[in-house]
Image (cartoon, coloured by chain):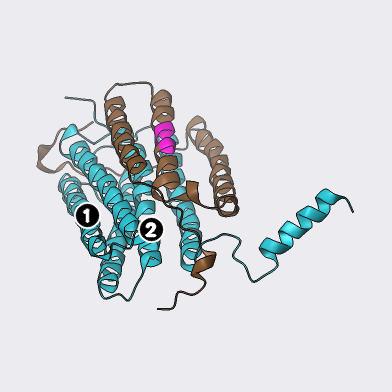
Chain colours: A cyan, B brown
Amino acid sequence: MSEAVAKSRATGLRLWGGGVNPYGVVYKKLGMWLFIVSDSLTFGALLFAYSYLRMSSPSWPSPFHLYPSIAFSSVMTLCLLSSSLTMVLAVHHSRQGERGKVVPWLLATMAGGATFMVLHAMEWMNLIREGMTLKANPWGDAMFGGTFFTITGLHMFHVFSGVAYLGVIAVGFGRKKFNADDVEVVGLYWHFVDLVWMFVFPLVYLMSVHMGE
Amino acid sequence: MSHGNEALHEHPSVGMRPMYWVWFWLLAMTGIEVFLAYMQLPLKVMLIALIGLSFVKAALIIAYFMHLKFERLNLVLTIIPAMVLCLLLMNVFFLDSKRLTTHGVNRQMNTAPVAGGADHP
């Protein structure tokens, strides 16, 4: 057995032979990463389905005017990106042991998520008033409404779940029931919600901007 | 709550300065995306530009906000390649969307009446 092979085996045994942590993360964080991988495949499949239907349709609608749709969705993007920054600040202060600063930043993150949901609900109401439903819309291919509401609805559900999760962690951290690891894990989830929107916003909104009068 | 084995878990200290920069660039790229949407570029060019920017934004979020850049390589290699491969494999379905358009298999245009007389394409 060569020296290189022996060294490789020794390293493998050291890392994977049991009693150590090869990833260097707590089990909750690894669990959240695995959830994120599976959830990204869910959103990936939905966005691929949306793109598939769009490519196969000769009359895919472009209904989004600068106001309100694009303006609202741009502000929603700003809210999510800013709430990601406040989440980073919450994680940073929790790691520094500055417990007093963590809960306010978690609350700021929740405020960003809540603003996103309110704006999104208003955007949905505008489209529903214009005649868009799951099965039909006034502008073209009937599948547009179904795919739009499914993708944005599932994302909004994730935002809602994230705000609730942040609330539980904020209360628990304030009562010293949770520690910095728990703040970091909820942060991973929140950033993932932000990440998904980075694909939904251009694919669903910006690719369907109305260029007419 | 029990949080044993703390010594086994690494928490590399990362300052806030790079995070502010990442946030700034994410906002800037979002602004560029909105600008591009109104440039009336060909659909394919627009798609490549927007998806390209989205991947850059996603990479920044994963690397810095989600801290993956500062984790062990073991974790990165366990998570990222398999996920990317699965997402890439979904591309195989796009060939079929081309078949639908070239063979004239179109779905029913189940359009609803325009409410309030709104003017749309």
The label on residue A104 is none
Report whether A56 appears left or right of B82.
left
Q: Amino acid at mark 1?
A: Met
Give whichever of discs 1 and 2 has the lower sequence position. 1
Q: In terms of secondary structure, where does tag 1 sit?
A: helix
Q: Check the image and name the residue furthest to the left.
A: B116
Please state which of residues A66 and A110 is positioned toward the viewer in this rendering: A110
The quarter holding residue B28 reads: top left
Q: Amino acid at mark 2?
A: Tyr
Report whether A9 appears left or right of B113.
right
Name the spot of residue A69 as percent of width and height, x first: 20, 39
Name the spot of residue B47 as percent of width and height, x first: 41, 30
The quarter holding residue A113 reads: bottom left
Quadrant the N terminus of chain A occupies: bottom right
Residue located beneath label 1 in the image: A117
Residue located beneath label 2 in the image: A189
Q: Chain of mark 2?
A: A
Marks 1 and 2 on same chain: yes
- Label 2 neighbour load within 10 Å: few <14, some 14-19, many 20+: many
Please state which of residues A24 and A64 is positioned toward the viewer in this rendering: A24
Q: Check the image and name the residue furthest to the right.
A: A1
Q: CA distance from mark 1 to mark 2?
A: 17 Å
- One can see residue A203 in this view: yes
Q: Please report the residue visible at 44 percent of the width from the left and 35 percent of the height from the top.
A: A55
Question: Is A62 one of the magenta-colored residues?
Answer: no
| Residue A71 to residue A187: above or below | above
Q: Chain of mark 1?
A: A
Name the spot of residue B46 as percent of width and height, x first: 38, 26
| Residue B110 to residue A155: above or below | above
Q: Please report the residue visible at 31 percent of the width from the left and 63 percent of the height from the top.
A: A161
**Magenta range:** B51-56
The quarter holding residue B54 reads: top left
